[in-house]
Image (spheres, rainbow, N blue to C red):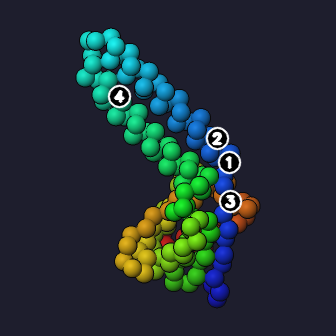
Amino acid sequence: MAKSEVYELAPDKKGATWDLLMYVPVVLVLVSIALQLWYGGTYQNYAYILLFAASFIFFIGANRVLMSRLMLMPSAPRGLEVAKKSIAVTLKSGDKIELVKDLRYFPDYAGKSFGLTGMDVSGRKRQFVFHKGQFASESNFKDLRSLLAVYK
């Protein structure tokens, strides 16, 4: 790879819809069971556990939808620039993070997303998740995955 490859990302609305269809019912079921236990009076202690689980899953789902799928948060990645010895991630806020050390690539088995971790120039560990729906075409996604296989 003589020059760097640049990939622009777009919001994945279809993936966000699927994530919402997955997380919202789970949170609603946990909260409704917790309310039944709380007002039932017999097993009130279990209501705390279920409300904790519901809030935990809510925050996980909100982060996944707002950060990685719809890219609404300022720290959401908007672009990737893959060079020979580093990967630069452009954030929505306009900052550019260059991962230069301990680069690791984590593909999923289904081939629909992957994760990147590494240390930036200031020595801070960074992690990012990218989904197939964020790329302009499936060929761009496959090309990037083949470039990143070096960091596996």
Q: Which residue is mark 4?
A: 50
Q: Three-letter amino acid code at disc 1?
A: Lys
Name which of mark 2 and mark 4 comes first in the sequence: 2
Residue at 55% from the left image edge and 36% from the top image edge: 22
Which numbered dot is residue 10? 3
Which numbered dot is residue 17? 2
Name which of mark 4 and mark 3 comes first in the sequence: 3
Instruction: Count neighbours of disc 3 (C-alpha within 10 A) and say few if under 14, some if 14 to 19, many if 20 or more.
Output: some
Element marked by disc 4: helix
Q: Which residue is mark 1?
A: 13
Estimate the spatial distance between the alpha carbons at disc 2 and disc 1, rounded to whole Å: 6 Å
* Percent x, y of residue 63: 49, 49
> Tag count in the figure?
4
Residue at 67% from the left image edge and 70% from the top image edge: 7
Estimate the spatial distance between the alpha carbons at disc 3 and disc 2, rounded to whole Å: 15 Å
Residue at 64% from the left image edge and 88% from the top image edge: 2
Name which of mark 3 and mark 2 comes first in the sequence: 3
Instruction: Count neighbours of disc 2 (C-alpha within 10 A) and say few if under 14, some if 14 to 19, many if 20 or more.
Output: few
Q: Is residue 102 above or below residue 111?
A: below
